[in-house]
Amino acid sequence: MHVENDADTSSKAARPPGRPAIGPRIGIIGGGQLARMIAIAAQPLGNDIVVLERTPHYPASAVATQALVGDWNSLAPLQDLAARVDLVTLENEFVDAGLLAELEKAGHTVLPSARTLGLVQDKLIQKQTLQAAGLPVPQLLDTPDLKTLGAAAQAFGFPFLLKARRNGYDGKGNVTVRAASELEGAWQKLGGDRGNALFAEAWCPFVRELAVIITRGRRGESAVYPVVETVQRDHICHIVRAPATGAPEVLARAGDVANRAVAAVGAVGSFGVELFQLADGSIVVNELAPRVHNSGHYTIEGCVCSQFENHVRAVLGLPLGSPRLIAPAVMVNLIGTAKAAGHPQGLERALAVPGAHVHLYGKAVSAAGRKMGHVTAVADTLAAAEETAVRAANHIVFGGPA
Amino acid sequence: MHVENDADTSSKAARPPGRPAIGPRIGIIGGGQLARMIAIAAQPLGNDIVVLERTPHYPASAVATQALVGDWNSLAPLQDLAARVDLVTLENEFVDAGLLAELEKAGHTVLPSARTLGLVQDKLIQKQTLQAAGLPVPQLLDTPDLKTLGAAAQAFGFPFLLKARRNGYDGKGNVTVRAASELEGAWQKLGGDRGNALFAEAWCPFVRELAVIITRGRRGESAVYPVVETVQRDHICHIVRAPATGAPEVLARAGDVANRAVAAVGAVGSFGVELFQLADGSIVVNELAPRVHNSGHYTIEGCVCSQFENHVRAVLGLPLGSPRLIAPAVMVNLIGTAKAAGHPQGLERALAVPGAHVHLYGKAVSAAGRKMGHVTAVADTLAAAEETAVRAANHIVFGGPA
């Protein structure tokens, strides 16, 4: 691995110039937009940020105090990261929990912990853990082979979902199986025949998708953010409305379920909880993300303390900030449509929309389905916020020459 | 000079690894807390920031894409900075305007311009310029020698102010002359006998100090922030209350005077305008700062678009954001009291105060009178905001071992 950014090399690290650590140093595994926004939120608190990502010039590298390049799924680069900082956190759930356990054995602080990540990153174990805690999840069946897959189809009927136990995101790693004839194709598509561990999940007839950010502190205290409504497009978060409308008791139930789900895995830090609301108003946990979450980007402008600052506070053992919503807020994702430049066209027109807050992630190249940025608007009404955010977002096009 | 941070060396620069410029690159002359907060505000817009400061490990170096170390008051380091970026801006008024003119001659974009800085950085020229524009300023007299100083004393009576024409800040460079017997001592204290250019200013019997941030765009458009009341302690900004209370016509006059003052010097970017309010409600310009200003730190949480983001928008020629105050806001500076560690004690207690936003500047060492950070609170009333901000600020002590 190499040090892409040696601006402020930790005193623990080999090479000068050494910047004296002023506040605690936070190491982040993964350098995408989530790490970038954690770093930006950590700066006002006086923290230096060291980030580790596989390839150079990643979104967080332009803002981190120190940007490392190395494979975060092998031990040596993780050990090097840990040696430079006071604690290690993460921006994605894909790093192997066993490697994090090695860091903990060596005396490093890792938050969320290796145990928590182990309970969350395998989606079958995650949902079994939530089920065991008495939380509502869809019906599940482990499908180690085609035979058990057939049994799952029998049990659930069609359609049902076949899912990879690990490394899925934005719909990747999920297949909807609509007929017996599709079983073998779905199995192969998700690599069941190549040894990928898969499981089956009963179809959940939800009426809408909700999400809640929970920041859980080291002492088990938690900040419960407003319940929001999320709208997906092509399995990617498209728009987030904060707060979600609807019956207060349903929203209260959603917040309570999310809070208990995060506690059930011993979380420390900001976690995103994706929920299904059923026709009868009941709530089912769709998925837990052991990290800051796209459904919480609105909190930067929309809440007193953002999910990012609260994540930093939580892992540092500092008091949590208020998750109170300042006013109705709507966030719209900026998704790449094709391979193009990472800096968009139309930024000027978007910034001319009063009240639009534009966030670009500094990715070198855009691609179809790639999250390139987002726009948030805060207004007196949800409708006004959505009108502003959508209007600004529609001006932004990642269509320049790549 | 050397590159402290080569994370993302510009393609124009010599040494790899080269990060492809994604958005425009902004160079900042000076690396203190103002550069740090400009950099933090520029990040969400996808801009890379390159900062130049004289000594390593400065507040902005931990957050800049590239941190350069070199003397910004000599041409070569400024040329090196300019060569790495798309435009150059500044965080202090002390860089020599003649050097900026050299950069402009070489074809670089410098905003605010060399001409503007030349009109502002010499406080006598600044006030003569404002006077010529029909704006209210205190009575002034140039005092090239002790003889003219005596004449100024005759004209103004005692007390009056003797000021250095350049490089003064936080009361440094000002002396109140209370009697004829103090004339020579004041002259020597400010280096009149060592060739420092000084001028005399009549005493202004103000009843309170006001300030306004104006962001002026490249096309002369401007965002006028709320008029705020500032309270100084030992000549250093101690507390800022937004909005200032008082008669609407007085506040309207203050905003108008500030807006015209910034236009009079051809400003581009966020400028701070310090004002005196006299007993009859009239307004006098105390001083213009050609940069983001301490009296505008409250805008980070208090306004729709902060003075820092609007500065970035202005110098990039992007539409200005709304300066609207979201709710009453109060900012309290965190001032060092003695030589001590740069990271404070009591941060945990301060963050436990609901609604307190703590900003630390990441200075390695604190010193008496040194600005180490600030706290902002936004609330339904000014009184509630002040109570929160003061309570949180009082918990923070820079008393650790240096």
Image (cartoon, coloured by chain):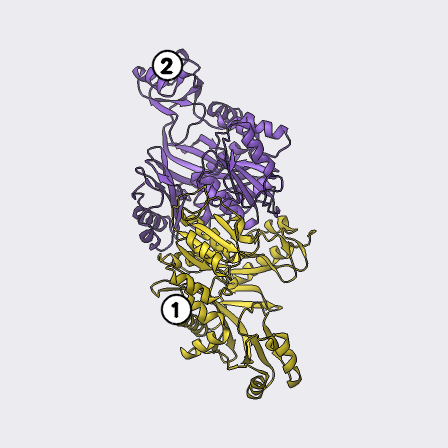
Chain colours: A yellow, B purple
Q: Position of residue A345 (x, y in %)?
A: 66, 51
In the rendered structure, which amino acid carries the disc numbered 2? Gln
In the picture as drawn, the residue positioned furthest to the right comes out as A401
Image: A101 above or below A309: below
Q: Give above or below for A147 relative to A120.
A: below
Q: Nearer the viewer, mark 2 or mark 1?
A: 1
If the image is split into quadrants, where does the C terminus of chain B sit? top left
Mark pair 2, 1: CA separation: 76 Å
Give how far across and how far down residue A367 sits, in percent: 65, 59
At label 1, the amino acid type is Gly
Identify the residue position indicated by label 2 in the image.
B154
Asked if one can make out residue B8 in the rendered structure from this viewpoint, the answer is: yes
- Chain bearing tag 2 is B
Q: Quadrant of residue A371?
A: bottom right
Q: Disc 2 on helix, strand or loop?
A: helix
Q: Specify the farthest residue to the top.
A: B147
Residue under pointer 1: A266
Q: Secondary structure at mark 1?
A: loop
Classify mark 1: residues with Cα within 10 Å, few (<14), some (14-19) or many (20+): some
Whether discs 2 and 1 lie on one chain: the answer is no
Across and down, in percent, residue B182 comes to 31, 17
